[in-house]
Image (cartoon, rainbow, N blue to C red):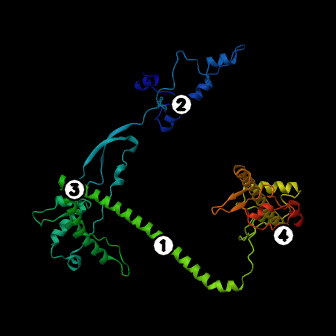
Amino acid sequence: MATGADVRDILELTGAENDGPISKKDLINSDKKKTKKATETLTFKRPEGMHREVYALLYSDKKDAPPLLPSDTTQGYRTVKAKLGCKKVRPWKWMPFTNPARRDGAIFHHWRRVAEEGKDYPFARFNKTVQVPVYSEQEYQMHLHDDGWTKAETDHLFDLCKRFDLRFIVVHDRYDHQQYRKRSVEDLKERYYNICGKLTKVRAASGTEPKIYVFDAGHERRRKEQLEKLFNRTPEQVAEEEYLIQELRKIETRKKEREKKTQDIQKLIKAADTTTELRRAEKRVSKKKLPQKREMEKPAVPETAGIKFPDCKSAGVALRSHRMKLPSSVGQKKIKAIEQILIEQGVDLNPMPTEEIVQMFNELRSDLVLLYELKQAHSNCEYEQQMLRHRYEALLKAGGGTGCASTPGGDAQAWPSADDIKVESKEQIIDVVGAPLTPNSGHISCSISSVLKTK
C-alpha cells in the first residue's frame, strides 16, 4: 500500500526534514526515532477515579492508543524488517568496467552506485599471478642446456606455464605435441622445476644456501601407475582383497592373544623363580647362622600379646599425639572395651601427650587388650569344661552309675566321679603371658586394679 511519502516521491514534491539519501543508521534507528516522537506527542493521564488496573487495560506502557482488533505479536520474523522513511534511496547506475587481469581490453557492464563511479574494480585485489622465472640466452647455454630438450621447446613450456599459472594439467592439454615430442605431465614438471632450481642456485648470493624445491618424477609416475591399477580392478579382485584383509585381521588378533598368553606365562615363571631363589637364599642364611644361634640360645620366652603400635618415622614434622592413636588392626569391640575400662577406673581418654605419658598410656592399653583376650579365653575354657562335665555325667548315667568302664583287654578302669572334679581356686598365681586357649588359661585370675596399680 502506498504511503504519503511514496506519493510525494512520485510527484517529485519536496518533503519535510527527511529529504535526502537513506543511510544505514537511518534504517537501524528508524524505530527509535518513531518511538521518541510518539512518546513526546502522545501524553495521556489516568483520569481521576479510575483504578490503575482498568487504566492498564486501556493503554500500554508506551502510551499508545488502545487496539481496535486483537493482534498476536508472537508470530512473524524474529528481527524487525527495515522500515523505509521519506528519504531517497542511493541511486544505482548501469556502468562499464574493465578487469585488470585481462589484457585484451574487454569491457563489461554491471550495476554500481553512482558515488562509486570512476573507482577501480573491487575484485581486482584477488588477481594474483605466479612469478615464472625468465632466463637469457647465455644462462641457457651455460647452465640450462639439456640433450632431451631444445631451447624452442623449453621456451614453449615456460610460455604456457606463465599463461596458465603453473596449472600443468592445462599446460599438458595445450602443449604442441605435433611440433614437439609427446611429453607427460611429469616430464613437463620435472623440466620446469629443474630449471627453476638451477636458476636459484646461479642467482643466489655468495655464501648463502637457497631453498630449492625438488620434484621426484619417478615417485609421481609410480603413484599414478598404482592408482591406475587400483582403479582398473575387477569385482572379483575387490572381493578377494576384502577377504584377505579380514583374514589378516583375524591372524593379527590371534597373534596378539598368543603374545599376551606367553607374557602371562613368563610372568608366572619369573614369579616362581624369584620365590624359589628367595627360599633357597633364606635356607642358606639360616644354615650359616645356625651354630651362632645355638651358642647364643636362651630359654624361649613366649611373645607378649596386646597392641603393637607402629613406629612413627615419617619425614617432616609429626605430633606426638599421633603415637597414641590405635592401629587399624584393633577391632571396634576391643576399642569399646578399653574405653569402658578406662572410664570405670577414672583414666582420661586423651591425656597430655608427653613422652612418658604416651609410653605408659600405650603400655596400659596394650595390657588392657591382653586382659580382654585372656578373659575371652578363660570364658571359652570354662564353657568347654562345663560341656565336658555334662557329657561325662551323661556317660555315667548311661553306664549304670558304676563309675567304671571296661577296656578292650578286659581290665577295669576307674573313672573319676563328678565330685572328684574340682576347680582350682582363683587365688593361684598363674603366668598370664601364655597364649590364649591353653590348658592353664582356665585358672587365670588377673584383676584390672592390679594392672592399673602397676602402671
Mark-to-mark CA distance, 2 and 3: 72 Å
N-terminal label among 4 and 2 = 2
Residue position for label 4: 355
Residue drawn at the location 9% of the way across and 63% of the way down = 178
Q: Nearer the viewer, residue 236 or 119?
A: 236
Task: Report helix, strand or loop for mark 3.
Answer: helix
Left or right for 151, reference 77: left
- Whole-angstrom CA distance, mark 3 to mark 1, is 45 Å
Q: Amino acid at mark 2?
A: Asp
Camera-near label (2 vs 3) is 3
Q: Nearest to the eye among marks 4 and 3: give it.
A: 4
Q: CA distance from mark 1 to mark 4?
A: 48 Å
Q: Which mark is residue 31?
A: 2
Disc 1 on helix, strand or loop? helix
C-alpha separation, residue under disc 4 versus residue under disc 2: 86 Å
What amino acid is labelled 1 in the image?
Answer: Lys
3D distance between C-alphas at marks 4 and 3: 84 Å
Q: Position of residue 132 (x, y in %)?
A: 27, 66
Which of label 3 and label 1 is nearer to you?
1
The location of residue 7, given as percent across then percent down, is: 43, 23
Q: Where residue 29 sits: x, y (%)? A: 53, 34
Mark drawn on residue 240 = 3
Q: What residue is shown with label 1?
A: 270
Residue in the picture at 34% in, 38% down: 93
Horizontal and vertical percent position of residue 349: 84, 57
Q: Badge 4: how crowded within 10 Å, few (<14), some, or many (20+)?
A: few
Instruction: Answer whether labels 4 and 3 touch (C-beta < 8 Å).
Output: no
Residue ranking furthest to the left: 178
Q: Is the residue marked by circle 1 packed among few (<14), some (14-19), or many (20+) residues within 10 Å?
A: few
- Packing grade of label 2 (10 A; few <14, some 14-19, many >=20) is few
Q: Is residue 120 visible?
A: no
Type of amino acid under label 4: Glu
